[in-house]
Image (cartoon, coloured by chain):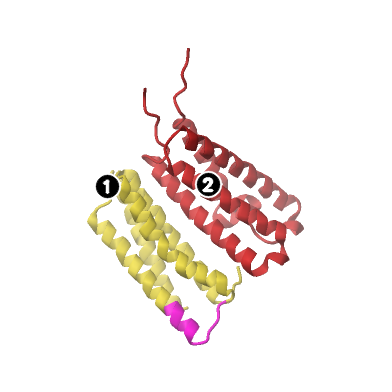
Chain colours: A red, B yellow
Amino acid sequence: MEQQRRTASGPGRVLVAVYAIFALAATSRAGVQISTKFHEAPLAYLLSAFAAVVYIVATIALARRGDGWWRVALVACSIELLGVLTIGTLSLVDAAAFRHPTVWSVYGEGYLFIPLALPVIGLYWLRRTAPVKVTA
Amino acid sequence: MIFGFAVTVAVAATLVALWSFVQSARNRLPDNPLLIGIAVVEVLLVVQLVIGIVLLAGGDRPGSMATYLAYLIGSLVVLPVGAAWALAERSRSSTAVLGIACIAIPVMVLRLNEVWSGATA
């Protein structure tokens, strides 16, 4: 049986590194927001925390080997893409409700739009490293 | 913060990042000169931590204490973790990992200074 391509090998190591930095950035930001001024904008700060969890899960799943972790990474990157598109759009449509920034506001404008590019690259990489399907 | 020192840290980290990306493009593995460059940046970050603590002890306050401490301490962990990740599998990609870790430093240092100058988030 052929070993699947590991998601954390080769270019995947760079991807994991970028994910880890976003996990750190999003977690720190959410931690500060929730611990110091949660009452100001509970929804925005809960979204920040949610984004942080997604980045942490994606980082760990991409860094691990095995079909199970590959699937976890697929789910995390998909939620991440959905999240950045949804929050990005909502923050443009209803700017008043999103005055308090999250990583995903305006499609990650505050982070050079990397939050928008990252899940796309992540999903592409997961396709490249997909577990080998047994075909009849 | 001492702005001049922050610029020094940011420029040093950016140079090491560029060096990493050039080396990766040349298909090089992480080598000792590059790792020494990373170590120099890390030492500068430790000095920055000391300066940050001394300024706090002197009675000055940043725009947001929590954010300030998060950047001050967070900036210290990026390079060691990045280097460990890079060296666990040595390839041209791990050289690029060092570059990614380094390029995060100027962003954090500049944000740190904004927070010190009164920014709250």
Q: Residue at x 37, y 63 (%)?
A: B13
B42 above or below A91? below
* x, y percent for residue B95: 32, 49
Left/right of residue B41 with respect to residue A77 in the rendered view: left
Residue type highlighted by circle 1: Leu
Kindly state the secondary structure of the residue where label 1 is placed: loop
State the image quarter where residue A95 is shown: bottom right
Mark 2 burial class by Cα count in 10 Å: few <14, some 14-19, many 20+ = many
> Rounded to the nearest whole Å, what is the CA distance between mark 1 and mark 2?
29 Å
Mark number, residue B60: none
Q: Residue at x 53, y 46 (%)?
A: A57
Instruction: Write the start and end of the magenta stretch as one range.
Output: B51-62
B113 above or below A30? below
Query: Which residue, as the protein is rendered here, is positioned at the far bottom?
Result: B58
Residue with the mark numbered 2 = A57
Residue type highlighted by circle 2: Val
Residue with the mark numbered 1 = B29
Q: Nearer the viewer, residue B83 or A120?
A: B83
